[in-house]
Image: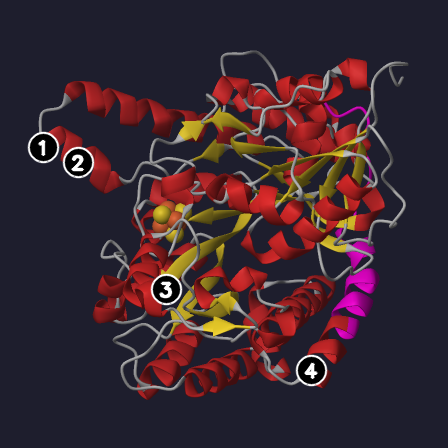
Amino acid sequence: MHGASNPRVFLVNPSDSAFGTAVITPRWLYVLAAATPAEFGDPILIDETLERSAPDAFGPGDIVGIGIHTANALRGYALGKLARSRGAHVVFGGIHATLYPEEAHRLGSATAVVKGDGDLVWAQVLRACRDGAPQPVYAGGHVEPDEFRPARWDLVPRKRYMWASVQTVRGCPKHCSFCSVWRTDGQRPRQRASDAVVEEIVQLRRLGFRFIALADDNFYPVTLTDLKLAERQGNAARLRELQSIRAERFELMARLAKLPSDMVFFTQITMEAAEDDEFLDAMHAAHIKGALVGVESVTRAGLKDVYKDFNSAGDELIARLQNFRRHSVFVLGSFIFGLPSDDPDTFTATAAAAQQAQVALAQFVMITPFPGTVDFDRWEKMLGADCPTIAGVPITRRWLIPPHLRPKLYWPHPHMSPEEIRSRTQGVWDTFYRLPAIWQRSSFIHSWRGRFLFTLISKIYRQMYADTGIATDSARVSWSARWARLLGKACRPLFAGRPMPDLEVPLYEGQGSGGALADLPAQ
Ligand code: SF4
């Protein structure tokens, strides 16, 4: 029910391209929907990766929440200006608004900006807008895990997404130079209790979602090395803290293992998990079938370039990646090109390593300094007052450059031109995603249906990312977008599961029996 004196609340996920169907649910929409007090009624959710919002969607007095990251900031600002011109209050949040609140005011006509987590502060912002007294900036800070809002999955248009997303931990103890997570979400892992996570997952399975992304910064926050170090230092308090985080991970995985066997989880993890056989076994039992692993570089010098010395290179790298596969956890390897130590041979060596390590999927990105990272700060400082401009915009504010004028590479390389790096990167994508190579990689799947699905996923992934992300040829980009849209539509039903409205929440050993799960038919 919508309160008579309360304004309508919109939550908008901006996007320049709409595919009709989307791969993953934008979790923040459903979390902020849960954080919206009942007196405002159900918020209206608009995900522009599905379809564009109507120009007359917003009206006087409405409150429009827009979540932005760097890639969709410009579209977000256009929406902000539109909504404000129609008399609505406009509130920006998300990582980009957290880093550049003044930009959201100046270019997006913000009434208010929320920095940090919105889980708790959102209710306060809504009431202040309604009462006509919003502050320009709200500090949401880092919310403690027991205060994370579970998402309002009752509002999701189930048939339009392939994967749902659930968060189990925020923050990452590492400090990679190209990543903003440890600086924005903090280095202390904020881990949700297994009850909260499992309840959300069961709710999703009841609705028919069986593919779920565990949208975590790092699913493996405590490594065996961390434990050994605390032990060696005789730091009993630290050791206890680490052991308890690790024990909670195992508790969560033990409960996920009791879910129907057709569930598929995917997460993001550091390569160090490869040395932890017990953890990998638990992941496999928990239906965590795949993980994005930041390999970044196949050379020791490249790893040094990005402050990721804890990764392996050479033969040790191949062995570690293969260990994931031995435990039936399939890897989406992420590789970066354009590092200062890269040369033309790096591209061939990387393509060969990805193939040899038997990673199921791979992404090859060109190094880009992202706001909020150490790399970005160094780059901005290096350019100083001489920063080049495009269409009057300094390249250190590249997200404000009209998309068709944006360069593909920003980081200067000691001996390769941007075009050389771009075309060699495209070449590695093309080699890795050749149909025969994909089919060969799919051999770990035993059913024809599964292999077909894997091939389609590989093709969609490549079309959505490689061509639209790094190609310079506009015909290729629009052909790819059309192709991805068609494939996405065709594939979505393959991801749907049979709704299980009676599914019960599995308990942890010691909490009692697994309830109705024991009676579920095999999938
Ligand atoms: S790249 Fe991964 S491991 Fe490195 S800081 Fe970011 S989340 Fe952590």
Drawn side of residue 317 relative to residue 430, left or right: left
Distance CA(mark 3)–CA(mark 1): 30 Å
State how far apart marks 4 and 3 are (Cα). 28 Å
* Eye-nearest disc, 4 or 2: 4
| Highlighted magenta segment, given as a residue range | 482-504
**Rendered position, 440 above or below 375:** below
Q: Closer to the observer: label 4 or label 3? A: 4
User: Of the residues under marks 4 and 1, which one precedes in the sequence?
Assistant: 1
Q: Secondary structure at mark 4?
A: helix
Q: Majority secondary structure of the magenta segment?
A: helix
Which residue appears at 32% of the width and 79% of the height? 413
Q: Which mark is residue 228?
A: 2
Q: Quadrant of the C terminus?
A: top right
Give me the disc on residue 181: none
Label 4 sits on residue: 474
Q: Which of disc 2 and disc 4 is earlier in sequence?
A: 2
Mark 2 near ligand 1 (CB under 8 Å)? Answer: no
Image quarter where the N terminus lies is top right
Q: Nearer the viewer, mark 3 or mark 1?
A: 3
The crowd level at tag 4 (other Cα within 10 Å; few <14, some 14-19, many 20+) is few
Q: In the image, what residue occupies the spot 59% across and 71% down? A: 469
Q: Does the magenta portion include 194? A: no
Give the spatial CA distance, label 3 vs label 2.
Answer: 26 Å
Residue type for callout 4: Ser
First in sequence, mark 3 or 1: give its number.
Answer: 1
Tag 1–tag 2 contact (CB < 8 Å): yes
